[in-house]
Amino acid sequence: MTNEFLVEIACPNCRHPIDVREHGRHVICDACRSQFILQAHLCPQCQSYHQQDEAICGQCGASLSRLCRKCQASNWAGDEYCRQCGSAMDIFDILVHSQSGYTADRLDQQMRQARDLKALEAAASASRMAELEAIEVERVAALRQRQRERKAEERRLLWLMGGAAVLSLFFLLLYLLFGWLN
């Protein structure tokens, strides 16, 4: 393991992080005291230890293999030289591969934040709409109440005017009746 990017692995028993710079190939977990020999591969993304050759990391889903540009042989993603032809694996490929995961994670995080923000905005919009609807209901209720009060006032005035007209006629009849009598 000469790759400088891989400095920490997860213990296969307890998942506790182990700094491989402090150990050789013989590794002892400080948390559970389990011992193992570092024979297999570490994921270049999450540094999980994989005892068997696997194409994809079971922890983070990162690719654990890549093809040699010369002979098209499958190699571990962190290998510096091809196992079949011995040609140098481009260090920039490793960096790009490593950064692509970070970019994908960052984009996923931004998408989650955008969805969360959209949900918050939708909730705030629904709340504002409910407030406006409540204000409109109150306004319409107050308008109807004023219309009822106005109609009641008009009916009362009509009754008063009708009563005054009847009284006027009554007094007119009395005047005419007593005027004829005198």
Image (cartoon, helix red, strand yellow):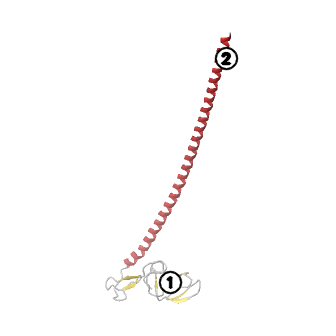
Task: Using a 10 Å C-alpha cutoff, classify the residue at mark 2 as few (fewer than 14 neighbours), some (14 to 19) or many (20 or more).
Answer: few
Secondary structure beneath disc 2?
Answer: helix
Could you say where residue 86 lies in the image, as x and y percent from the top left?
35, 88
Q: Amino acid at mark 2?
A: Leu
- Give the labeled residue for mark 2: 174
Residue positioned most to the top: 182
Helix, strand or loop at disc 1? helix
Disc 1/disc 2 C-alpha distance (Å) = 123 Å
Quadrant of residue 62 in the image?
Answer: bottom left
Q: Nearer the viewer, residue 168 or 77?
A: 168
Q: Residue at x 56, y 51 (%)?
A: 131
Q: Which residue does the numbered mark 1 point to in the structure image?
A: 20
Among the 4 quarters of the image, the one containing residue 76:
bottom left
Q: Alpha-carbon neighbours of circle 1 within 10 Å: few (<14), some, or many (≥20)? A: some
Residue 18, relative to residue 117: is it above or below?
below
Q: Is residue 26 above or below residue 172?
A: below
Q: In the image, is residue 144 above or below residue 165? A: below
User: Left or right of 16: which side holds 108?
Assistant: left
**Label 1 is placed on what type of residue?**
Val
Q: Residue at left 55%, top 54%?
A: 127
Sequence-first tag of 1 and 2: 1
Give the foreground label among 1 and 2.
Answer: 2
Q: Residue at x 42, y 76 (%)?
A: 98
Residue 159 or 102: which is nearer the viewer?
159
Which residue is depicted at the point 54% across and 49% down?
133
Asked whether, in this view, residue 174 is left or right of residue 78, the answer is right
Task: State the residue in front, 111 or 93.
Answer: 111
Q: Considering only vertical position in the picture, is 21 above or below 162? A: below
**Quarter of the image that includes the C terminus:** top right
Residue 51 position within the rendered picture, expressed as x and y whole percent measured from the top left: 48, 87
